Image (cartoon, helix red, strand yellow):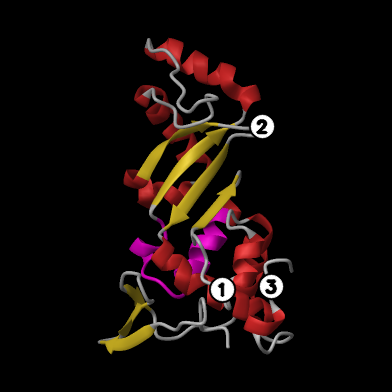
């Protein structure tokens, strides 16, 4: 009952020791053939529901309704939670597919530090977006801040080449944000919801709505 999105199901076929899966209007994804619903999987499921960037309304309504957009993203200030999420994703995906790119978000109270970095590098801090809270346009500052991100979350060193940019936005501590493709999200979310709710929910199409 949890293996559907918008009341449609994927196609899966065996290829050697792996599976190749494809949802309607999505690309193929290589999958591991077995998943053990262990404490790690369940803990990360609850963690993502609480802290992941995907709206909860989307997670609950996707079984019966076609989601307008489906993306997988996670933001954290610590290496431990990022590591746990990536480890959970690697239980069903190949390591190279768990992360598309990552960036660093910096709250407004830390903008002076970005300016100081720019002064050290001899460049101005150029902010994108109408309100200045979009992508930082000064590549030198973004590259300088990248090393801080790798020190905070060493698990991302294997994805160093997938670093995107610094984003001055909102408030709060500087934090790391990573995301994966919508094709990956289509495989992870139904299994996440199964791990969390399968013991209490028999039919997510009927029992879940976007208002849960």
**Contact, CB < 8 Å: mark 2 with mark 1?**
no
Determine if residue 40 is in view. Answer: no
Choose the circle earlier in sequence order: 2 or 1. Answer: 1
Choose the circle earlier in sequence order: 1 or 3. Answer: 1
Q: Quadrant of residue 93?
A: bottom left
Is 72 located above or below residue 34 in the figure?
above
- Read off the magenta span: 82-99
Label tally: 3
Decide if residue 115 is on the left or right side of residue 42: left
Determine if residue 79 is in view. Answer: yes
**Residue at 54%, 76% in the rendered image:** 190
Residue picked out by circle 2: 171
Residue picked out by circle 3: 209
Q: Which quadrant, please, contains the C terminus? A: bottom right
Residue picked out by circle 1: 65
Choose the circle earlier in sequence order: 2 or 3. Answer: 2
**Residue at 30%, 89% in the rendered image:** 14
**Contact, CB < 8 Å: mark 2 with mark 3?**
no
Is 10 located above or below residue 133 in the figure?
below
Give percent across and percent down for residue 1.
58, 88
Q: Is residue 83 magenta?
A: yes
């Amino acid at each position: 009952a949890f293996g559907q999105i918008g009341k449609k199901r994927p196609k899966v076929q065996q290829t050697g020791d792996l599976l190749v899966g494809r949802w309607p209007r999505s690309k193929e994804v290589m999958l591991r053939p077995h998943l053990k619903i262990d404490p790690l999987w369940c803990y990360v499921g609850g963690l993502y529901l609480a802290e992941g960037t995907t709206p909860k309304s989307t997670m609950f309504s996707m079984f019966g309704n076609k989601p307008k957009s489906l993306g997988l993203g996670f933001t954290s200030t610590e290496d431990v939670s990022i590591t746990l999420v990536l480890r959970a994703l690697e239980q069903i995906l190949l390591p190279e597919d768990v992360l598309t790119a990552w960036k660093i978000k910096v709250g407004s109270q830390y903008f002076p530090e970005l300016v100081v970095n720019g002064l050290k590098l001899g460049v101005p801090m150029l902010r994108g977006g109408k309100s200045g809270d979009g992508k930082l346009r000064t590549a030198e500052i973004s590259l300088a801040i990248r090393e801080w991100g790798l020190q905070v979350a060493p698990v991302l060193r294997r994805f160093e080449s997938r670093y995107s940019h610094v984003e001055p936005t909102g408030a709060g501590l500087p934090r790391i944000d990573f995301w994966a493709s919508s094709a990956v999200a289509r495989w992870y979310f139904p299994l996440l919801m199964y791990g969390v709710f399968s013991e209490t929910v028999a039919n997510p199409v009927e029992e879940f709505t976007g208002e849960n």
